[in-house]
Image (tube, rainbow, N blue to C red):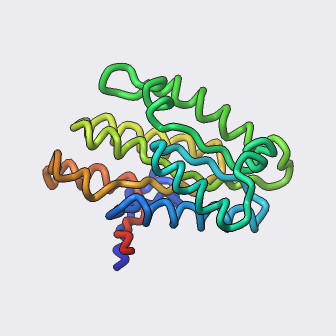
Amino acid sequence: MKSETPGPPDVHPYHRMEIYKDEAAIAALVARMIVQALQLHQPALVMTTPSIKARIAEALEEAGLDVQLLDTERKVHMLDEQVLRDTVMDGDLPNAERFNEIVSALLEGLCVARRNLCVIMIYSDMADALVRANNLIGARALEQMWNRLAARFSFSLVCGYAAAGLNQHVPTFEELRELCEQHNVIRLLRH
């Protein structure tokens, strides 16, 4: 099932919300997206939990890719979203200056060897972690920062949201609408 809803005009044109049922499904999707990026000679950045990161790495290895070599060659970089989130957060809100500084450095590092064209495939579930921590305001602010960063970098961003995590905090319609409006495509991943 695919549901597309246009976001407001300031939403980055390749900012997708992917609502997933289980980690295996999202890891398989992200691994396929990484393979596609590599086939186009473009880099990938993944910011996720250690368990999803391990599943993605396993899927890439099964596809015959050396994950350590990809990282060394600045083709794919995977990091723990919690470490990045802890670094950019000021209490309940992400610090825009730190977010821009850290994420810009990551994106520039991936693009350093690509002089003519660099369109980074990004997967992140940092905002989902904030939703699960009952911090929808922080999640929305983080999504807005991604949209603003798109003015400086070319990337395709997929934000993973675990459907299972929503039972801890069921957002109001207004909260959900505000979060969805930061994306231009909203999909339910069925596996």
**Residue 184: x percent and y percent?**
43, 62
Give residue 7's quadrant in the image. bottom left
Q: Quadrant of the N terminus?
A: bottom left
Residue under the point 59% across and 62% down: 59
Of residues 9 and 86, the one nearer the viewer is 86
Residue under the point 13% across and 50% down: 172
Identify whether 171 is placed above or below 92: below
Residue under the point 25% across and 56% down: 164
Left or right position of 95 against 42: left
**Residue 114: x percent and y percent?**
83, 49
Identify whether 73 is placed above or below 137: below
Residue under the point 85% across and 53% down: 116
Of residues 34 and 66, the one nearer the viewer is 66
**Residue 29: x percent and y percent?**
51, 66
Q: In which quarter of the image is the C terminus?
A: bottom left
Identify the residue at the far top of this view: 90
Left or right position of 151 against 87: right
Q: How many marks?
A: 0
Identify whether 147 is placed above or below 133: below
Identify the residue at the far bottom of this view: 1
